[in-house]
Image (cartoon, coloured by chain):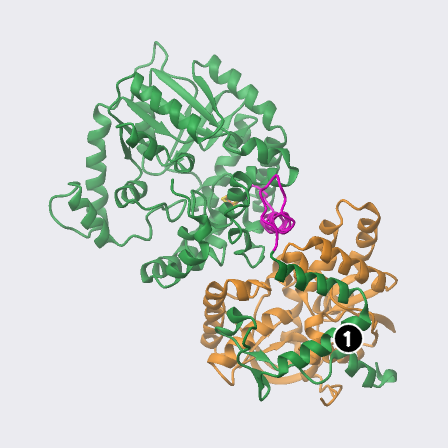
Chain colours: A green, B orange
Amino acid sequence: MNITTDKFKETARQELANAHTQKFLQILPLRLASRRDSAYQSFPDPVAAHRYGQSIRDESIQRLPELLQVFETNAIANGARVFWAEDSRAANGYIVELAKRHGVSYVTKGKSMVTEELGLNEALTQAGIETWETDLGEFITQLLHRPPFHIVGPALNIPVEQICDIFLQKGVIDAPTTDPVALGMAARRFLREKFRDLQMGITGVNMAVAETGTVINVENEGNIRLNKSSPRILVCVMSLEKVVPTLADAMHMLRVLCRSATGQAAGAYISLDSGPKRSDEIDGPEELHIVILDNGRSAAYQDPKTREALRCIRCGACLNTCPVYGKVGGYPYGWAYSGPMGQVLTPALQGLGNTGDLIRACTLCHRCKIICPAGIDHPSLLLYYRYKDVVGDRALGGSGAGWRERFVHTLLSVAGSDHRLWRLFAKVARLAANRFRSGDRIHSMPNGPRGWFSSRDLPALPAKTFRERWAQMDPKKN
Amino acid sequence: MKRVSLFIPCLVDMVLPHIGESTVALLRHLDCESTYHCEQTCCGLMSFNSGFRNEARRLARHFIRVFENDEWIVSPSGSCVNMVKNRYLELFDDDPVWFARAHDLAPRVYELSQFIVDHLGVEDLGGTRHAKVAYHESCSTLNALGVSAQPKALIRSVRGTELVELTGADICCGFGGTFANSFADVSTALVRQKAQYFLDSGADLLVMCDPGCLLNIQGYLDRHHPGRGAVHLADYLAGSIGDKTQVAT
Ligand code: SF4
């Protein structure tokens, strides 16, 4: 996948000016966020259920190395083949090689963020293997060559007219229609053909159970099930943090995941697969390959702070609640993971090199932290990344602050540690700012904060600070 | 009589000093004696949020030295209170000595409305002011400090004041310190939305507990909707009790 995280500001500006994006973003939080809230009420004790989920994720991540080993052992005992992929090249190489070995000409894929992360579609296409996304939204974005806009609805921002055009172009429909149901049915008929003599299916993994070696998927359209049960070879790609200790833990996390993602008590289809088809079974794949992807996660695990990002279960609740995502949508985040989820995951996995804007594109409003069913403290992590970036941390690839910024903060801290200097500083600041006053307002300052003045005024600084007024107040009255 | 130490954020000191005066007036109205340490400067919030932890640590140590002997420390700023109460612990997590001092100080620091309602147990200041107001939930005040019922109770207690519903009251106004400047487009989109919700609410005034939000929202209103006003809770309440503290400038 083409990573464009470094263009955050530019893309954000485009999306702010994009009427479709803005229209979709207006309905999104109202729909999904309120559905989540009411779905949570179906827990006897919503707060306890939320906390319990957080503690499961906490335990899963603290015990990660051990749980992965147990998972591997049990998956192999079930007849699955497990491949540990250190990075995207290794993962893509393994999958392409597997497809070639079996003479597969095309594969179908269930919606999966991790294969988005890998850029698997491109790798398969380059090897001459056709790839078909089977989730309706992913199918549309694939045809349009666009990255997913939202984790739950990757193409929710694409107007029906545009979908109609591309479907006509690709032969999915013969006559134009803007009826969403008709478009959905057409895509479904088109993709069902692909399932008919499918040889290889690929899916992501929502959860992996250490205790039983099971991989679990949740969906609403039923396509992942077809991907899993109709081919001879099934490949499930999981990022290594998806493991939970027991089946009971997985059941609770599923309840939390579905409520947080779509406001449903459960997804329409939940499939649990433990191993390939057995000799006495009539359907299911003959070979089950589980690719466990690292891609920077072991390194992120080493630091107890960045480790926290691995708790994420990709529910998307933080996207729906984030005021910044709510204005700019998914594209500016520039990688598979958007919103607050992307802001904590992308730097952990890719380092701070291209994510300087990403970690700062946040007002620290704390809504994501409160809603997160995995217990991630996003604001705290973002502040940590900023710190690491400012000091030019080697391990995370921080770039170090520019001299101007460094100068301002040094000055602030030196003056702020001595109140006489601080008073002087206040006087100078007032004189400097008030040179640009007109009446009791300042409308702009050449060389001042341009961004601020692009839409806001500033009050002129009053002649007396609080401290000076305090000195004038009647001490007996206070 | 309680002695309350005033924690006046740098923004209030230099730009919005009337909020400090109103705070003094309210405390006096509640029989609290205000004290003010002239040595106080800045709590370090801006440096900390920008990633300059070493610089923020210097400021935090200065703050702790100035305030650590006080029994009650009250500030008219939710975000600065959150910094001192919660973020200092993070700032000193690898420095046991300063961590202990920060930890010791934290429970004595209050946001103004929190102090009045939770600590003094007062929900009615007995003031009068005829206005229709809406309340904006500042993020730090609401999400980090959990303070929301307190300011609303105080507003409702004012005779003649009607508190109206505000759509999106708990959605960020887009300030975020330096965010407002470095992500000006996104920030503007957010403050525009906030202003629109306020105008739609039919309220005369938008009340809030954070000077940062106030600077942002008022700055936007002045530019685009002159004459429409936002106001800090301390100023609103002080106005309702007929405060005469304000020193001529
Ligand atoms: S960070 Fe939390 S809220 Fe956001 S997608 Fe991950 S689990 Fe869900």
| Front in this rendered view, residue B25 or A198 | A198
Chain under callout 1: A
Horizontal side, residue A300 vs residue A10: left or right: right
Place of residue A438 in the rendered image (x, y in percent of width and height, measured from the top left): 56, 87
The reply to whether residue A385 is in sight is yes
Is A200 rendered above or below residue A305? above
Q: Pointer 1: what residue?
A: A423
Quadrant where the C terminus of chain A lies? bottom right
Is B233 rendered above or below residue A406? below
Q: Secondary structure at mark 1?
A: helix
Farthest residue toward the top?
A279
**What's the magenta region?**
A373-401
Quadrant where the N terminus of chain A lies? top left
The reply to whether residue B171 is in sight is no
Q: Would you say residue A380 sits in the magenta stretch?
A: yes
Is B189 rendered above or below residue B97? below
| Front in this rendered view, residue A42 or A84 | A84
Horizontal side, residue B197 vs residue A425: left or right: left
Residue beneath the point at 33% across and 53% down:
A157
Place of residue A450 in the rendered image (x, y in percent of width and height, measured from the top left): 52, 71
What amino acid is found at the position of numbered circle 1 in the picture? Answer: Arg
Q: Which quadrant of the view contains residue B118?
A: bottom right
Q: Which quadrant of the view contains residue A474?
A: bottom right
